[in-house]
Amino acid sequence: MRLPTIAAGVFACLVTNVVATALTYKLEAGEKACFYAETNKENEKIAFYFAVQSGGSFDIDYRVEGPDSKIILEGEKERQGDFVFSAQKTGEYSFCFDNEMSTFTEKMIDIEISSEHEARTAQLPSKQGTSPEQTSVLEESIFKISGQLSTISRNQKYFRTRENRNFSTVNSTEKRIVNFSVIQICLIVCMGALQVLVVRFFFQGARKGYDLIPLRQRADAGEIDLARPDKETVAATTEKTKNALTALISGAVAAQKPKNINVGQRKEATFVRYTPANQMGDNSKKQDRIIKIVERQRDPMEPPKFKHKKIPRGPPSPPPPVMRSPPRKLTAEDQEMWRIPPPVSNWKNPKGFTVPLDKRLAADGRGLHDVTINDKHAQFAEAVKMAERHAREVQQRALMQQRLAEQEKARKDDSLRALALKTREERLAQSSTPRASEESDSEDAEIRERERPDASGARKKSANCGRTEWAQSGGSRGFDSGFNEDNHYDKPLFAAQDAISSIYRPRANVNDDSFDDDAGDKEMAKIHKISRFGEALGKGPFEARPMPRQTVGTRRTRSVRKEAADPFNVDKFLSEVDQSTSSKRGYGLQADGGGGGRQAKRARVDDDDDEGGGGGE
């Protein structure tokens, strides 16, 4: 049993077709390291594996080059990689790692490079009694075991890499915490020392103007050396001052120089020994010459001689393929549908062709549109018609209401005119009745009071003065009578001013001599006697006052002429209208008890006329 096992181990050591190199390398900061593998066969498989175990961010730059310096693999800041490629050429392949990105950090790298050989380097020794089939089965088992071992080794390397990275992260975190703690402690100590210095400076008596105190008067000056310095000290001080002033001046001059102009330093002249060569078959000896090469003078204001050119943009990405259905044969209907008539212009016809109307309309395209009539046109027309009918009805209704109002107004005017005519007739009928003696005496007294001159010596005129004069003069003046040639006005301007001003004022007593404390009672008794207020004050039935009679006084003679006859038959017309309308509408003038309401209205109108006549007289 031991013999086959030993034989298998020897076969695994000698017959394996893979040569592997695995190592762990420490790469310093800024270092570049290369490893090499040589191949003797073309198209040989080469496996390359690396992983950063520790250091920094666990990243590294790598590059794989072939025998002709051709770059096969390249990467920057990679943590790990596992690649397999075929060697196109025989020779030496280089695997380089670069840590120039790190300034202080060193990195630990795990590297494995393996190459494959096609020929076997050894064979198992054959034994008597063994068949070739048994040997091949043993080889296959050994190959399987070798593959499993390589897989296990790769997994172990992966876990080890993770463990190293975790340990490195923990150590780095610990170092950072320690460093931050130390820095924080140093800052606290420095701030405390600075505070102590500031407090000490303020409490040591440092004050403004301390440097202006002469040295001889300072308490801490000590001994003052007033010896004259030697020449070396003076020269050193002078040189130091000169250098400081030169630095200031050179800085000011450099600040004034233009900054956009490239004025570089000129290179030093170089000397070259020149020996002429043989030319055109001349074999004579030539003398050597020394040539001085000086850089050509360059204009600092010269514009650049190069020109920026835009690189033409590359072709865009190809359009995506569009999947279309296969073409089908057009039918006659499709061809007729796609037939486009020739264009016919409505404005230009340079050759003067006669274009038929159907061709012109076909070119216009209006025949291709479906004409649809909107129902809203009919609705709108119907609405307009109904609105017009309604407007006519409203107009007719308004016209009828206006006519009825006019007729009502005409009837009211006729009734009022008839009422005025009856009132005038009753007034004329009552004008012949004599007045009581006491009323005539009071009216004569009032007339005398009105005609008394005022303070200015002018007599007062009543509102009826002009009316009385007009009635006495005939009552009618027209164009046939000369139209009042001596007077251009038909009535006085301020005839009613006194009457207007005394309407709402209490009347004074006619006789000023009889004024006493009982004047108010007398006036009230006089008002009670007037029949106008009799019904309102409970003094018997309402009776109309008789019209004033004609009186002849000592100072004025008053005469009233009767009205002339009706020349135009107006009164007759009004009486007829009154008779025709009184049966239809009474306008509130007919009372249920007879003519009491009409007589009351007539008496009220007579009283108003008496008051107006009394004021005028």
Image (spheres, helix red, strand yellow):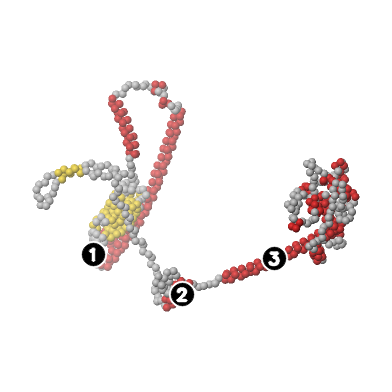
| 1 and 3 marks in contact (CB < 8 Å) | no
Q: Nearer the viewer, residue 377 or 46?
A: 377
**In the displayed image of the protein, which residue is found farthest to the left?**
284
Q: Earlier in the sequence, mark 1 or mark 3?
A: 1
Q: Earlier in the sequence, mark 1 or mark 2?
A: 1
Q: Nearer the viewer, residue 374 or 242?
A: 374
Decide if residue 129 is on the left or right side of residue 583: left
* Residue 256 location (% of width, % of height): 34, 39
Mark 3, other Cα within 10 Å: few <14 / some 14–19 / many ≥20: few
How many angstroms separate mark 1 from mark 3 (CA)?
143 Å
Describe the element under mark 3 as helix, strand or loop. Answer: helix
Q: Which mark is residue 126?
A: 1
Task: Answer whether residue 587 is visible to the viewer in this image.
Answer: no
User: What residue did someone put label 2 on?
Assistant: 357
Q: Residue at x 67, y 68 (%)?
A: 393
Describe the element under mark 1 as helix, strand or loop. Answer: loop
Describe the element under mark 2 as helix, strand or loop. Answer: helix
Q: Amino acid at mark 1?
A: Ser
Q: Quadrant of residue 42?
A: bottom left
Q: Amino acid at mark 3?
A: Leu
How many angstroms separate mark 3 from mark 2 (CA)?
57 Å
Disc nearest the viewer among 1 and 2? 2
Q: Earlier in the sequence, mark 3 or mark 2?
A: 2
Q: Which mark is residue 399?
A: 3
Decide if residue 438 is on the left or right side of residue 323: right
Q: Nearer the viewer, residue 565 or 268?
A: 565
* Residue 404 location (% of width, % of height): 73, 65
Q: Nearer the viewer, residue 506 or 617?
A: 617
* Residue 320 location (% of width, % of height): 38, 65
